[in-house]
Amino acid sequence: MVKLDKKKTLRGLRTCGILLFASLMRCISLYVFTVPNKFAPGGVTGLASILYNLPTHIPVGVTIVLLNIPLLVLAFFKMNKTFALQSLAVIVLLSFGVELFGKISAVPQYGIEQNADKMLAALFGGAFTGISLALTFKVNASSGGTDIVGALIQKRYSATNVAWFILMFDLAIAVLGGVLLRDFEPVMYSFVSLFVSSKVSEAITNGFTTAVTFTVITKKAPELGRRIISEIHRGVTAIKSVGLYTGEERTVLQCVVRKRQVSDFHRILKETDKDAFAFAMPATEVLGQGFTQVLNTSVKRGNGGGDADS
């Protein structure tokens, strides 16, 4: 029991640390790069940037909190309560952090100088936002805005392409910023920032360890399988099959290899059965022995992508 409590405490501390770091990344993106350059890269933070740069000069932190309150209430009652509470923590930290940065003269704002490179601001702003998005998603939270809207839509209409909906909404906010601020140059940089944030978030979420899944139809399955296991130390799954056109029985081999092992796999395949039919598919995230550690112990490992030398 003590051991379980210790693990639970450590997980809680880890989650708090991730949420704090993710909020810091979003604060830097918003205060240092987005607001001073009048970018509006979608979501509530984009609207907050627009309202701040209008003559109304509404504080960014205030806008973020006020616009997210109804969304958080919906998330609390319609979705997982942990998701809503952790998202609330991120939003509060983000709002407080942005306002705190404004009080600290040591925190710079890139873009207030006349000769500042706005492309750099868009790239770095998008990168910091992407890091924040990926980290919050990893621990079942969000930074509010369209993230919560997308999650609610996905829960209600699972077949809906939420990613496209969020993208269209974010692009609309970017264009709205250009209309209200009467300056369309920041709109183009906002598009760049949106693209970078999505790519960075995707890379972190899916993982940087890439692999390739090979499916091979061969008459020499035993020999080919033995060579794959012994030479590149990867597990192989054999599946019996029948060709509907020829009516002949074949064996289908499936194997997941790391990207650096692809050339060795090609060599073995060519040397063993040059008449084999094979195709490959990218695998951006692989869970199991020899790849990413499986966190859920209830998931049983198969032998298709196991690593014999792990």
Image: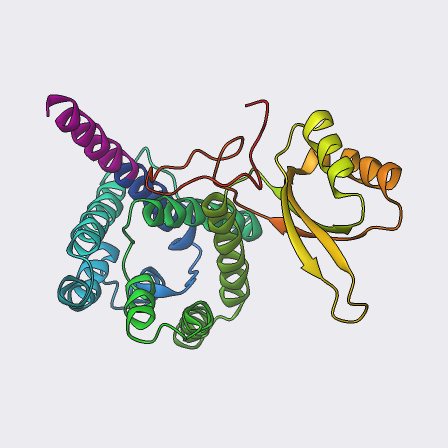
* Residue placed most toward the observer, 93 or 309: 309
The residue located at (48%, 37%) in the rendering is: 288
**Relative to 190, 20 lies left or right:** left
| Residue 113 appears anywhere in the view | no
Could you say where residue 152 lies in the image, as x and y percent from the top left? 27, 69
> In the rendered view of the protein, which quadrant contains the N terminus?
top left
Could you say where residue 43 lies in the image, as x and y percent from the top left? 35, 64
What residue span does the magenta drawing correspond to? 1-18
**Magenta span contains residue 9:** yes
Q: Is residue 211 above or below residue 43?
A: above
The residue located at (32%, 60%) in the rendering is: 45
**Relative to 126, 139 lies left or right:** left
Q: Is residue 21 above or below residue 151?
A: above
* Residue placed most toward the observer, 154 or 167: 154
The residue located at (13%, 28%) in the rendering is: 5
**Magenta span contains residue 132:** no
> In the rendered view of the protein, which quadrant contains the C terminus?
top right
Could you say where residue 276 lies in the image, as x and y percent from the top left? 83, 50
Magenta region's main secondary structure? helix
* Residue placed most toward the observer, 190 or 138: 138
Q: Is residue 143 above or below residue 302?
A: below
The residue located at (89%, 46%) in the rendering is: 274
What colour scheme was applied to this rendering of the protein?
rainbow
Residue at the outermost left position: 1
| Residue 210 appears anywhere in the view | yes
* Residue placed most toward the observer, 72 or 121: 72
